[in-house]
Image: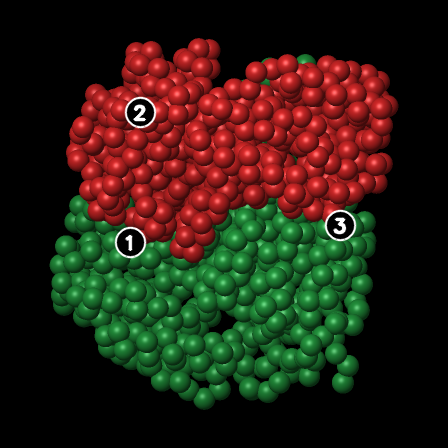
Chain colours: A green, B red
């Protein structure tokens, strides 16, 4: 059968391929029919040239045009919802409903629309004006952005439609998407709609490009290429760190989401007050999408005692009474088994599960380890077990809990449950600052798996959760600022300034920092 | 004689030294009397432990306290102005007046006061509130910051008093300063005043620490240490890139200012209209502080013709009629001679100068090269010659000029001179976007050497000018945001929120993004 084409320079054309691959249906283990190319460097080179030309055109386009594209793309995705959800289901085994069609797809189109709104309004770019000195600055496009999408959100994080895509495009940059090889066909459908929306709305043809697969060496070459402005990467820590090193060496912004355990500290007052309920919540959060969320709680930290034992028993019961889900791929199942073994090798004991099952499944798994043991091997015991497995650390006392928190790596999130009567307040005061410094989002009395798309969200955190603790991958308008460079205009003649920096507020709504005060007014001439 | 102590954990104490060094008076070539230690890792380790403890205390302090420290520090520097300027003069040969006492010192104290104002007001941290979901985020401290100051601004960029120091401290982080070994005694005096201000205002004792020198291997270890939050580095590209790689490997934000040629494009209309005046401006800008500014114009790009020849002749005359200044150190003089040789080896011809002179001086130097030659060796011909040397590229025609601009590396600044009658407008439209994408600050009709400390300044730019194109090292409040992590609070109980995120606006003046709109109001309960 014929090999699927790649999308380069505005048209679908045969790849310069070094080989082909097919995705697998995780539910059946069978290869899916469509055959996709592994591109050689020639495709990357073509895509970069086309993207660079598109970047120069995009820079000069009015924001309204980009916003219209984003909106139109969202509408087109919605119109093809059924086919997209079915295709993604076949490639990921995620439920077609509600997950794909009713949750992830609306999230995806919602993100595109929020990005469109941010572009139209314009405040995201923090326009800053010193009228007296006539020095003005604003965040502006930085060039083509290469986006590697992850395996676990075939729509909402897809390189050709997800959050990074929306943010990079909204910031005025063309996107080159590297599809995740687990769901190439879903990526293809999304790219078809993106291209159609590009044509309908008059964006440069190469504003959106798609390739499916690359040899690792070509990936490294790609992220370090002079024509590229920045990279968005969501995926495994191993691959991510190699790409990051290549990008870092040439000072290329590399926004990576690499791994996170999302520790949840449950204080004794909370355990006493509502331990059973929290055990239920924790287990539920662990099993969401079979634990294949970046914010899945992979670590709980408790103080030793009867209540802790009851909590562990409660989680165990819930895990054992829930049918394990199908994992995203054979690779995920294999890595999960290996990670659970690594945790055991480092001293963790199985409470339940730990066994690979037929059909790309893994028994719902809970492990436990003493605080003492954790402190003896903090690095190994923070191995991420991506999937339906979590580790409970039982600290002997508060002093040990403090030490455990000090050993935590950077994470996307960290949560603390405390009681409602103030018994835990002193402990909270002691532990919260330790956790705060290690996580991007601190939660109270809430599991981390819900990531609302709101301006105040931070889906980011200290290394190794991401590559830079100052940025978020979710939430407009902040996520746009990753894909921008600060552009200052010093003594530039008024008519040559970008609209956002001219004396007249271009849309009457844009917030600009004028003489140190945020304002929607014009600059007094 | 006795070895100067280091400032660690709030007291001046003997260093754990592997050796000692003395700075040199660049005007005489003689070693200055004070002997300074090269610290071993034991000092670094102690400083990191003390800084980490201080970081935890600083996090909990009211902004007012940090602001008071910054202001008090500025006052104390002013009170010791004479001694500080004299010491800096002895170590750098920069004129005591006006440069050190009347320009750089006021700039330094001005930066500290602007940082204090930014802390008091609080908007720098972009507090963002979604009241309905009770998700709130704000930029917060990220931990101890190590600052490497450069050789060329002993006060305004000093690790213990300069712009990076002010920004890092204002963002709530303790600072460990690594003095530049060319001006250790100046750094010592500033650190004395910093410590006194720390004590007067009740900041944690280790909020400011100072070491003078480190073995390169210890520097690499330092920037990668888990206790460290971020690094500020201003200095040479070679040393900076090694440190950057070590920091990048562990995801540590590394804000580097590495090198910049600051290209100036002078369009033919401008040359015809006021070539002699621009030649005068260009030469003046090149010779400011003997060209030892990060924004010194090291590259001019012209179109071939009589006017270009007249411009070159005009610059030559001015350079030859001005006495060369003393360079900052024997090392600077040596590097400058080597860089000029490297430019010649790559095809540049000497117009004037090119000769080392006695007493740490170098003849004011101008080189020229054809556009064709530049395009044959664009990398070598963008060698930074830090000091009083610049290169003129003479392009055959506009097409060649375009290619030259496409070959430019990232720079802090780039300027375009055009005429006032519109003759150059079409060329400006063609060339400005190319330059814009390669520089942090685009100037019109103005030389780049003035860097105003204003909210709209960008002292930053694409690699290799800096390590990330989204940040500025000069200008409050944006420069504070480099030394911060994004901290989100999800469902956190109201009384546990930082003041900036509580419903009540803490000072009535702080701008917060509430439901997508900037506001100084309280959040409606």
Q: Are marks 3 and 2 in contact (CB under 8 Å)?
A: no
Disc 2 secondary structure class: loop
Mark 2, mark 1: which one is toward the viewer? 2
Q: Position of residue B522 (x, y in %)?
A: 42, 29
* Mark closest to the chain's N terminus, 3 or 1: 3
Q: Position of residue B66 (x, y in %)?
A: 31, 27
Q: Is residue A216 above or below residue B107?
A: below
Q: Which subunit holds the residue at mark 2?
A: B
Q: Is residue A179 above or below residue B293?
A: below
Residue B311 appears in which quarter of the rendering?
A: top right
Residue B177 appears in which quarter of the rendering?
A: top left
Q: Is residue A88 visible?
A: no
Mark 3, mark 1: which one is toward the viewer? 3
Dot 1: within a 10 Å radius of its alpha carbon, few (fewer than 14), some, or many (20 or more) residues?
Answer: many
Residue B32 is tagged as: 2
Q: How far apart, in angstroms, are the residues tagged by discs 3 and 1? A: 47 Å
Judging by the rendered image, the residue that carries numbered circle 1 is: A416
Q: Position of residue A284 (x, y in %)?
A: 37, 68
Q: Which subunit holds the residue at mark 3?
A: A
Q: Residue at x 22, y 71 (%)?
A: A369
Q: Residue at x 42, y 20 (%)?
A: B27
Q: How far apart, in angstroms, are the residues tagged by discs 3 and 2? A: 58 Å
Front residue of this view, candidates A518 and B18: B18
Q: How far apart, in angstroms, are the residues tagged by discs 2 and 1? A: 57 Å
Q: Are marks 2 and 1 in contact (CB under 8 Å)?
A: no
* In-image side of B516 versus A198 (left or right): left
Circles 3 and 2 on the same subunit = no
Residue A54 is tagged as: 3
Disc 3 secondary structure class: helix
* In-image side of B306 versus A302 (left or right): right
Q: Position of residue A85 (x, y in %)?
A: 63, 70
Q: Which subunit holds the residue at mark 1?
A: A
């Amino acid at each position: 059968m014929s090999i699927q084409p790649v999308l380069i320079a505005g048209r679908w054309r045969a790849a310069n391929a070094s080989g082909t691959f097919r995705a697998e249906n995780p539910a059946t283990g069978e290869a899916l029919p469509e055959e996709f190319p592994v591109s050689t460097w020639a495709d990357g080179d073509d895509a970069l040239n086309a993207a660079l030309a598109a970047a120069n055109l995009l820079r000069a386009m009015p924001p309204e045009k980009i916003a219209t594209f984003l909106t139109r793309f969202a509408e087109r995705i919605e119109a093809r919802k059924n086919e997209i959800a079915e295709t993604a289901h076949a490639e990921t085994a995620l439920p077609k409903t509600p997950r794909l069609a009713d949750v992830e797809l609306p999230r995806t189109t919602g993100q595109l629309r929020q990005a469109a709104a941010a572009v139209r309004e314009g405040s995201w770019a923090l326009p800053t004006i010193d009228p007296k000195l006539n020095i003005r600055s604003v965040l502006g496009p930085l060039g083509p952005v290469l986006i590697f999408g992850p395996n676990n959100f075939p729509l909402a994080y897809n390189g050709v439609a997800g959050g990074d895509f929306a943010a990079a495009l909204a910031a005025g940059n063309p996107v080159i998407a590297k599809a995740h090889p687990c769901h190439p066909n879903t990526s293809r459908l999304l790219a078809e709609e993106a291209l159609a929306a590009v044509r309908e709305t008059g964006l440069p043809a190469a504003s959106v490009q798609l390739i499916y697969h690359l040899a690792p060496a070509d990936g490294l070459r790609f992220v370090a290429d002079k024509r590229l402005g920045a990279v968005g990467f969501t995926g495994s820590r191993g691959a991510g760190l190699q790409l990051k090193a290549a990008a870092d060496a040439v000072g290329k912004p590399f926004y990576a989401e690499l791994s996170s355990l999302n520790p949840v500290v449950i204080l004794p007052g909370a355990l006493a007050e509502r331990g059973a309920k929290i055990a239920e919540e924790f287990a539920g959060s662990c099993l969401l999408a079979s634990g294949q969320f970046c914010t899945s709680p992979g670590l709980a930290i408790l103080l030793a005692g009867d209540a802790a034992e009851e909590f562990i028993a409660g989680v165990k019961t819930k895990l054992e009474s829930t049918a394990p889900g199908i994992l995203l791929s054979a690779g995920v199942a294999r890595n999960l088994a290996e990670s659970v073994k690594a945790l055991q090798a480092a001293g963790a004991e199985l409470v339940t599960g730990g066994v690979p099952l037929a059909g790309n499944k893994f028994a719902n798994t809970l492990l436990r380890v003493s605080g003492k043991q954790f402190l003896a091997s903090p690095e190994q015991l923070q191995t991420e077990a991506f999937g339906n497995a979590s580790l409970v650390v039982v600290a002997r006392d508060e002093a040990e809990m403090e030490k455990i928190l000090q050993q935590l790596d950077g994470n996307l999130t960290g949560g603390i449950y405390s009681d409602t009567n103030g018994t835990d307040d002193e402990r909270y005061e002691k532990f919260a600052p330790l956790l705060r410094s290690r996580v991007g989002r601190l939660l109270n009395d809430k599991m981390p798996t819900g990531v609302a798309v709101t301006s105040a969200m931070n889906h980011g955190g200290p290394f190794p959760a991401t590559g830079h603790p100052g940025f978020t991958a979710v939430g407009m308008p902040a996520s746009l600022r990753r894909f921008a460079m600060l552009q200052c205009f010093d003594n530039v003649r008024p008519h040559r300034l970008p609209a956002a920096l001219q004396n007249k507020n271009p849309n009457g709504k844009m917030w600009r920092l004028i003489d140190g005060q945020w304002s929607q007014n014009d600059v007094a001439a």
